[in-house]
Amino acid sequence: MTEQKFESYSGRKIAIDASMSIYQFLIVVGRNGTEMLTNESGEVTSHLQGMFARTIRLLEAGLKPVYVFDGKPPHLKKQELAKRHSKRADATEDLNKALVTGDKEQIEKFSKRTVKVTKKHNEDCKKLLRLMGVPVIEAPSEAEAQCAALCKSGKVYAVASEDMDSLTFGAPRFLRHLMDPSSKKVPVMEFEVSKVLEELNLTMDQFIDLCILSGCDYCDSIRGIGGQTALKLIWQHGSIEHILENINKERYLIPDNWPYQEARCLFNEPLVFVDDERFEIKWSAPDEEGLITFLVNENGFKSDRIIKAIEKIRAAKNKSTRGRYECFESANELESFFKPVVSTAVPIKQKESKCVLGSPKPIIKPKMFSVQACTDSGPKVVGNFSLPTLALGSTHSTLLSRANDQQDVARTRKLIRKEGTKTTPGWRWIAVGDTCHPDSREIYRMSEKVIHQFTRVGYTRETAVAVPESTTRVF
């Protein structure tokens, strides 16, 4: 997992799960208790307001969105849909009780739980997007599966959604928080399925089994088995079949007629369109007259705001007509853009080492060392730095304790003063924690802090800290 800026996807084609976005808009946009944005006929327009504004933001940033809508749900999903219907019914009862008592907090809470994306909501958004000149694809079944298929075939760069089932369908790249409002200032989280599999030490088939055990839309999970337990069982036994043979059936209750094999088949071979004849991914100029008729005349949007928005769409489309690298006149210009150039305006000064050792003017050659994060599968490099070749203790020294412990620096400084000049280093890495951190940003901050502290002791940092591979658990 890597953190990316929203603007870094300029020029990229991104497949978006439309239903998930519409659901978020219905919950958030213009909501005040049980009241939502409506037109003169009393029809809800929150989804149109949200879709219109969010899509313009994507276009202005140079992104090329492709919205994919759900088709007919697979048979195995009927049970999950029935559960959702039951939860909405319960929420409706709780909402009615809250309305009687006048509890505003409870009214807000339960009214959101009653939200359902209807066929009309979908059709409204399809019409809006087509008028905006944005491609729309109607999947034969699951939108997430179709998004993954588009990504696997190279028609889009990545899939954007908040539901990570796209990874289970095999999407090479998956983006979270791309559709979040700019006010949140949340970085986009990019996952690559190949790196996720490498990090978890799983094959794709094992990853699918892990998702089924952890809980999916197609079948119940085994009660008592969560994500961490499921991962350990997959590591130990390799597949659901072998897990069922060895599991303690008194402790873990396996559902009757558990259709895990059918669920696995749906993830491996989902119903998707694979040829270009069924759809066309093409961005076109906005239908300005059509947008005004649909949004202003039919749904009560303010005309001046829509006219300004259309100007933004037109400007964004003109800007995006040039490809991701077409702004460079030649290959040499493109290469020079990525080639680091040393500025001659300010002379580079080499700082002398601050380490004061026992012998006069000792010859100290710097060596590269790594800051690593200790995970279940072994240490992962999160950065490098150089230091003089002097001993800091044996490999099994207490210096290999938690690197965010303030006492580590004090112990190291004391050891340097005590030992004096040495010619070989006694250890080669710093352990950042003893387990996998749930947030790679925390590892980043810790490693930054460690390098800063050790620099004060006499180390010379030569390379920037980076987190090339996430240590975040997917589940």
Image (spheres, rainbow, N blue to C red):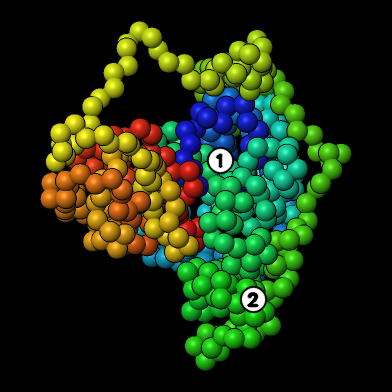
Q: Give neighbour class at mark 1: few <14, some 14-19, many 20+ (Cα, 10 Å).
A: many
- Out of 6 and 193, give the one closest to the viewer: 193
Label 1: element kind = helix
Q: Give neighbour class at mark 2: few <14, some 14-19, many 20+ (Cα, 10 Å).
A: many
Q: Horizontal and vertical percent for residue 127?
A: 69, 34
Eye-nearest disc, 1 or 2: 2
Q: Which residue is mark 1?
A: 47
Q: Horizontal and vertical percent for residue 358?
A: 14, 41
Q: Horizontal and vertical percent for residue 229?
A: 49, 73
* Left or right: 143, with 100 as reference point: right
Please tell me which residue is depicted at 73% across the width and 39% down the height of the picture. Answer: 154
Is residue 35 visible to the viewer in this orientation of the structure?
no
Label 2: element kind = helix
Q: Which residue is mark 2?
A: 240
Amino acid type at mark 2: Ile
Please tell me which residue is depicted at 58% across the width and 43% down the height of the picture. Answer: 160
Is residue 447 visible to the viewer in this orientation of the structure?
yes
- Residue that lies at the very extreme toward the top in this rendered image: 345
In space, the residues marked 1 and 2 are separated at their CA atoms by: 40 Å
* Left or right: 475, with 460 as reference point: right
Q: Horizontal and vertical percent for residue 91?
A: 46, 64
- Residue that lies at the very extreme toward the bottom in this rendered image: 250
